[in-house]
Amino acid sequence: MHLSLIENPSSLRDITPGGSLIGNVKVPGDKSISHRSLLFSAVAEGETTIEGLLPAEDPISTANCLKAMGVKISPISKGEIVKVQGVGLDGLNEPDDVLDCGNSGTTMRLLLGLIVGREGRHFVLTGDNSLKSRPMKRVGHPLKMMGAHVNGRAKGDFAPISIVGKQLHGAVIGTPVASAQIKSAILLAALTAEGSTTVIEPANSRDHTERMLKAFGANLEISGEMGRHITLKPGVKLKGTQIVVPGDISSAAFWLIAGSIIPKSDITIENIGLNPTRTGILEVLDNMGANIQLLNKREVAGEPVGDIRVTYSEQLKSFTLDNEIMPRLIDEVPILIVAACFCDGISQITGASELRIKETDRLQVMTRQLKKMGAKIEEKADGLTINGSQSLHGANLDSESDHRIAMSLGIASLLADSNSSIFRSDAASVSYPEFWSDLERLRN
Ligand code: S3P
């Protein structure tokens, strides 16, 4: 451990607690929408322009994989409109080398769906150590029901994953978990299958894929109870379009919680995506009695958007999360665990076993790290019990290379009674490269 600290000292960040957070902040583009905008425009006909694309490691992994298959994508950097020259539904070339998805589960799972139907071409997908230990059979299995040839380590569950492209056939597929990555992979494979494909979800997962595929001209029908039957009829070419990516509510979540729990804070977060399949955190904050105002609600390029003002709440109530709300706030659980340490009473999280197969086992890692600060947390198979009204102590913390853990520990450290240091804090760059500079700027 000491050796790696010396090798990369910039990843060790010292945090002095105290003060409040005041001002306006613009979080970067939504990660889910950014991945989709690159993937769908790659197989559309003609040019797509993407405004507000997240310039962070995960979408760059997606762009690099697409470039390796012959897609032309202009440079991705802050404030630049990205242009993608689509190659059409069957235009992706066989790459010369392995496709590296980095740390990004969305890249690997959605790419799988996009390439399995490219007849006669061979692809290998890999990633970093975290991604190589995340389950891929959940996508490989339904794709096999459509005739796909997908293999990998551990009987197809772990990357490297190899694919030999085949002509697929449509199918009716019920997914065992409400996962937008599984749903999206199936719908992407369905674009070139013979016959229509229906995905049936046990609960609604985020619907950015459905919204955006429609904007590209796909023939998509949504039916059934709560819109959980999604049918795609192939035979339609996707057409390049203009996409505007809103700010990511999963990145805004750090400021929503920080503003609520840090005395005297007053933060306005601009231009946030408010898609109802993603706003579980606002429902929870409302029930906790947080001071949240939604401002300037509008619709931008098929997604609801608004600004959010949050001010400190002296008395926040504890909360309960269960499997009903989980898909609407799955990525916000780590920062909600921090919030639970500072509200009145005991908070309960259940139905959260999916957290164990994210970039890290987030239930275990948050428990391990917050316990170093003296937090009282009990880990259960599918959740946590967290005592509120705690005073946390400064500690030597570690993100364990998970971006959302790094940022959650950063906010927890602001309320500790002494200095903390966070090892591997640079993991934040996976989804929010300017998190630490935004934090410094907001501090008062
Ligand atoms: C994502 C879906 C969610 C989420 C992930 C991004 C997406 O994963 O946790 O960060 O962009 O589709 P699951 O689909 O596995 O729930």
Image: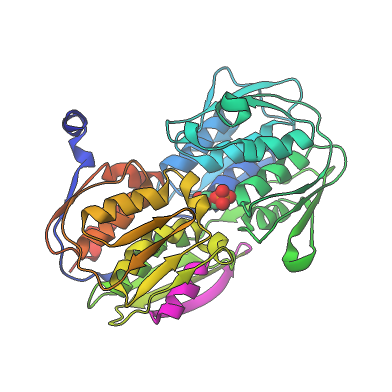
In depth, the one of 331 and 274 nearer the eye is 331
Quarter of the image with the N terminus is top left
**Residue 348 in the figure: left or right of residue 97:** left
Q: In this picture, is 434 found above or below 125?
A: below
Q: Is residue 192 magenta?
A: no
Quadrant housing the C terminus: bottom left
- Residue at the (21%, 30%) spot, across then down: 4
Identify the image quadrant of residue 401: top left
Q: Position of residue 131 (x, y in %)?
A: 48, 35
Specify whether residue 207 is in view. Answer: yes
Task: Give the quarter of the image for residue 157.
Answer: top right
- What percent of the width, then of the height, locates residue 436? 26, 53
- Return the residue nearer the eye: 238 or 166: 166
**Which residues make up the magenta segment?**
278-302
Going 51% across and 37% down the picture, which residue do you hit? Answer: 134
- Residue 75 appears in the picture as rendered: no
Q: Residue furthest top?
A: 96
Residue at 63%, 36% (x, y): give it: 137
Q: Position of residue 210 (x, y in %)?
A: 69, 55
How many numbered circles are shown?
0
User: As drawn, which residue projects farthest toward the right?
Assistant: 195
